[in-house]
Amino acid sequence: MRTRPSAWHLALVPIALLMAVPLLWMLVTSLSTLAETRRFPPSLPSHLEWANYATAWTDSPFARWMLNSSVVSVTCVVSNIVLCSLAGYAFARLRFRGSQLAFLAILATLMVPFQVVMIPTLLIVKHLGLVDTLPALILPNLVTAFGIYLMRQFFVSLPVELEEAALIDGAGRVRILARVLMPLMGPPVATVAVLTFLSVWNDFLWPLVVTSSPEVMTVQLGLSTFQSSHFTNWPVLMAGTLMSQLPVLILFVAGQRFFVSSIANTGIK
């Protein structure tokens, strides 16, 4: 069913354009020369400087940084889908002593900022001998409290009769979860995947703390090496930043429908 434009839609248009200004400024700067970025008032480039993208890619281990970010992000997405699904199913369907208290304790961790637990996490990673390695970037993001909460809410909303029918047919819990319930969990799985990928891909603080070698850096940390205290090549930096955001934009556009549906369903339960 198509929705007719309303006054609210018209009011959101200028807000949407305002939100797009940083992205447009980044695109224009990436196609300008260094001299053009220093003009005041700012103006559009006289010609498109596509060489900035080639410079950002070739004058640094940009491909390695993108590969590191991809490996870390995809691994965390897969682990979050698996572990959050198992935990969410346990809290929604299984009855065991202390389940409610354990679930409330997990929800309470949502109010604890990462900066509070960063030092203990770093000490654990150091004790395991993982400092300056890719596993050190993956370990703190293997599972999230919000993912567990989201998956539990959707498992609760599914009819219990589906599970009871499978139990009568002789299926076990793991088989019910994998064959019966998970095929119905498209929206929350897509939401956990998108949110985890966005969080891990754009993370800067933890990679800054736990890595130092250029070969292990993620793309967000690698981009910071384009800046120095005396000189910053803004067109090249903006070109690299725009390339680093392409996977995020593609994933968000692809999963937007599931993402909005999942958040709306979770909010009304």
Image: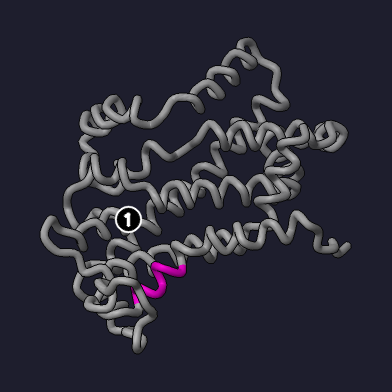
Q: Nearer the viewer, residue 146 or 160?
A: 146
Side of 74 where 234 appears, left or right: left
- Expressed as whole percent of the image width and height from the top left, the position of residue 192 reads 58, 45
The answer to whether residue 168 is seen in the rendering is: no
Find residue 150 and report its image quarter: top right
Q: Residue furthest top?
A: 97
Q: Nearer the viewer, residue 205 or 185?
A: 205
What's the residue at 28%, 45% (across, down)? 207
Side of 240 where 169 appears, left or right: right
Residue named by callout 1: 220
Chain part drawn in magenta: 24-30
What's the residue at 48%, 36% (across, down)? 143
- Quadrant in which the N terminus appears: bottom right
Q: Amino acid at mark 1?
A: Gln
Find residue 135 and report its image quarter: top left
Q: Residue furthest left?
A: 230
What's the residue at 26%, 31% (across, down)? 122
Is residue 161 magenta-colored?
A: no
- Quadrant in which the C terminus appears: top right
Position of residue 176 relative to residue 110, above or below, is: below
- Expressed as whole percent of the image width and height from the top left, the position of residue 124 reads 27, 28
Which color mode does the image show?
one colour
Position of residue 68 relative to residue 192, above or below, is: below
- Expressed as whole percent of the image width and height from the top left, the position of residue 81 reads 56, 44
SS for callout 1: helix
Find residue 131 and report its image quarter: top left
Side of 82 where 256 appears, left or right: right
Is residue 28 magenta-colored?
A: yes
Q: Nearer the viewer, residue 102 or 11?
A: 11
- Expressed as whole percent of the image width and height from the top left, the position of residue 198 reads 48, 51
The answer to whether residue 51 is seen in the rendering is: yes
Position of residue 109 relative to residue 4, above or below, is: above
